[in-house]
Amino acid sequence: MRYPTTFLLLTTHLLALQTTGFNLWNPHLSRTGSPCNSLPSLQKASRSWRSSSTITALNAAPVVLATSNSWAAYLDEANNCIYYFNSKTGESLWEPPKGEDFSSITVQPAKLAPPAVNDIKPAVTVVGKVDGSAEGPVLTDGASNPISAMMSPLLKKSKPISPASAPLRVESSSVVLPHPEKRSWGGEDATYSRGGVFGVFDGVSGAEKQEGMALYSKTLATEMGREVEKRSDSSFTLRQLSDILTVATEIADDTATGASTALAGSVGSDNRLRVVSLGDCVTLVIRNGRPYARSKDILHSFDCPFQLGDVSPDRPKDSTTLTVKLMEGDVVVSGSDGVFDNISDVDIATLVASTSNNSPSNLAKVIVNQSRQISLNDRAKTPYAIEAKKNKIMDYSDGVGGKVDDVCCVVLKV
């Protein structure tokens, strides 16, 4: 079971009021801009969740190390790096800007461990080129980074997509496998897949639900499909994907129960994959049998992803984004944490490469079945167990063990 957004947000807010007398609520996390308007519903929602002694400081302001003209250097402790931001132009750089003096900086980020041989090709944040001409994978951090959030492509009007001279052909298929205890009613994961457009929606199992109402995750999938089918062009920009999720979210808020993470993607006529992700669903691009690019999770804390729900302040505009120029032969695997908590990216790539029948439908089945098999093995070394040990979760103190969950997967083959 995941921790709820509402529980941690409420606890953090009340702690700030109690200890400092100031309201530390981050404005982007509230639909109304005033947390007081949503406190009653947050209190109601939090009663059904397990408690935690962990208090998360959400989106703390980055540390300013030095300034030069309109440039400022920031220490990003979460991502272990220094970056530079121009308050006039909105430009963001990982290297010191030319002509500016930042020699006074003495703080250095900790040395990063060398990447493993099969690590994913690192994606880079390229402000202003997210929907444009960058050759490598491009990420934006969403609401987890206050600076990049201000420049998010989801807040800007998108330029039309220019079709490639030779558009790639894309096949897709999806599979959903409910938690063993939820087979009778289908579980809480849902997917949408049509050509090069897809969505993955992971229902939050611990969220309070009302009988007789549709599940939030399944409503998101249904409404995404309806919104996509209304549009004549299925080649969507990041902003359009976010808008589609926003429409689906507004309907789910009014008609559904529960909460859900959400991921929406599209392969455009320019052969670029674009993904918008709120929470911990993942899109993994596999090229030449190896991981090539991966979307970025957005979490409030361990086991507490950003999530959509009628009492959640998280919204589609807070999502992270991924843009990748695809090549013939690429395989795109998207799934809920039921997949990626149990199988590493490298092992998924190996599984795809070693499966003789590599049709999207068969690959999705193989990945889902392998995820379930590993989840039932309490001695398996899984990504979830490794992170749970780091976060001192008692059941995973030895760093091994699968995590049984609903599982869903969408596979695109280029």
Image (cartoon, helix red, strand yellow):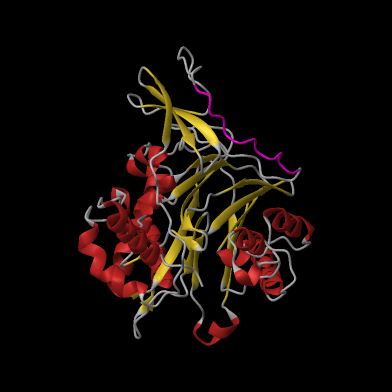
Image height check: is 345 above or below 155? below
Q: Residue at x 64, y 42 (%)?
A: 327
- Is residue 238 visible to us here? yes
Horizontal side of 313 relative to 185 (left or right) equals left
Q: Image quadrant of residue 157?
A: top left
Image height check: is 165 above or below 284? above
Image height check: is 179 above or below 317? below
Residue sticking out furthest to the bottom: 184
**Magenta region, residue range:** 105-116
Q: Image quadrant of residue 248?
A: bottom left
Residue 127: where, in percent of width, then height?
44, 32
Residue sticking out furthest to the top: 99
Magenta span: predominant SS is loop
Residue 106: where, in percent of width, then height?
53, 24
Residue 106 in the magenta stretch? The answer is yes
Relative to the observer, which residue lies in front, 276 or 241? 276
Residue 288: where, in percent of width, then height?
73, 46
How many marks the image carries: the answer is 0
Relative to the observer, which residue lies in front, 163 or 51? 51
Q: Image quadrant of residue 49?
A: bottom left
Residue 180 in the magenta stretch? The answer is no
Horizontal side of 255 relative to 292 (left or right) equals left
- Is residue 174 visible to us here? no
Residue 309: where, in percent of width, then height?
35, 66
Horizontal side of 404 relative to 106 (left or right) equals right
Q: Residue at x 51, y 58 (%)?
A: 280
Q: Residue at x 51, y 78 (%)?
A: 187
